[in-house]
Image: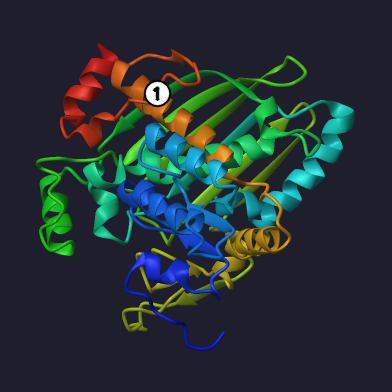
Amino acid sequence: MGTPKVYSEIREAVNDERVDAVWVSSPNNVRLTTIRTIVEEIREDRSNVNGIACEKPLAASVTDAKEMLRLVENAGILHGYLENQVFAPSLTRGKEIIWNYARDAGRPYLARAAEEHGGPHSAWFWIPQMSGGGVVLDMMCHSFEASRFMLTSPDETREKLKVQSVSGEIASLKWTRPEYVEELKNRTGGRVDYSNSPAEDYGKATVTFEAADGNTVIAETSVLWCYTGPGVRLILDLIGPEYYMSVNSLQPDLHVFSSKNIKPKSGVYFVEKQTAEQGLMPTVADESFTYGFQAENRHMVQSFLQNKMPLENWHDGLAVLEVIMAIYKSAEMGKRLKFQPGSFDGYVPQPARGNWNPKMNFLNTVS
């Protein structure tokens, strides 16, 4: 690819006549500002950009996401939502096989999806006033969209699954313990203080849908920033009347082992967010391929070059974000909610409001 050109400002980047598309991966709280800037340059004919791909989650709030979608559609810009898990080869191939069975045995009725690791790399993810939330916003967007993808027939659009109800729960299991509060402070140069303003490191949710054929189908999702294991663990299950499929990212076809007599140098790489260099280690040979990043980005590039709307776009990102906010609100209220699209525009999760007390939240939920 050669040496990349580095720009000091977003306008400078999109004004370069060689730039046809933009990938946005800035912190969640500045996504809307970034999109406004890009769209302004395009509308004023100072940019050749015809497509924008945005990392998950689409924004820090439903209000911001709706405005971002309005801006790009009014300007006639193609938009892609960067949700890598729905492009993971194991998931796409598994779905293809399962839905061949489903045509004879009936559609699947239960999807389970989990993502677990020890926490994000960058400090801003940990700060709920910047990110908009904790692990639920950061990772359940993956798990929910993967579930929706699995439960939808290849012949249907995902909108055919109508969300009926949402039940959510959040907690801080690890990172508000005193010793880990200090670890986070040290790791982030004092920027993150979970004794004062924590985000959740655990979340689970149950989402019920009405399918196009009138049947009820369910997605169960769970996410952790407090998992200690060999690396990132992705677990995906799809269950139907006469079949099931299962994916576990820490059960690859490659493992390596080192005995206690070997002292590996720190930094030996096996899998993202590994917490050890010794023992029996699952090793992902090509993470960008296995996790779907290669297929995801290839699809976005090809779509923009062909002037087609990507299959995973900002309508999907908005739909996911509305459910994520419903999960937070359900957790705050301590009850299952009937899902009403459009009712979460002004909602800000408790952690992002800066007044979340994990202990009191749990007590309110069980009272």
Give me the residue at 18% from left, 28% from top: 359
- Residue 174 showing in the rendered view: no
Nearer the observer, 359 or 37: 37
For badge 1, the amino acid type reads Phe
The count of marks equals 1
Horizontal arrangement in the rendering, residue 159 relative to residue 362 (left or right): right
Q: Is residue 39 above or below residue 109?
A: below
Give me the residue at 69% from left, 58% from top: 303
- Tell me the crowding category of disc 1: few under 14, some 14 to 19, or many 20 or more residues within 10 angstroms, Cα based: some
- Residue 318 showing in the rendered view: yes
Can you give x and y, in whole percent of width and height, for residue 183 in the image? 15, 58
- Residue 291 appears in which quarter of the rendering? bottom right
Q: Which residue is mark 1?
A: 344
Horizontal arrangement in the rendering, residue 229 relative to residue 141 (left or right): left
Horizontal arrangement in the rendering, residue 219 relative to residue 360 (left or right): right
Can you give x and y, in whole percent of width and height, for residue 95 in the image? 74, 44
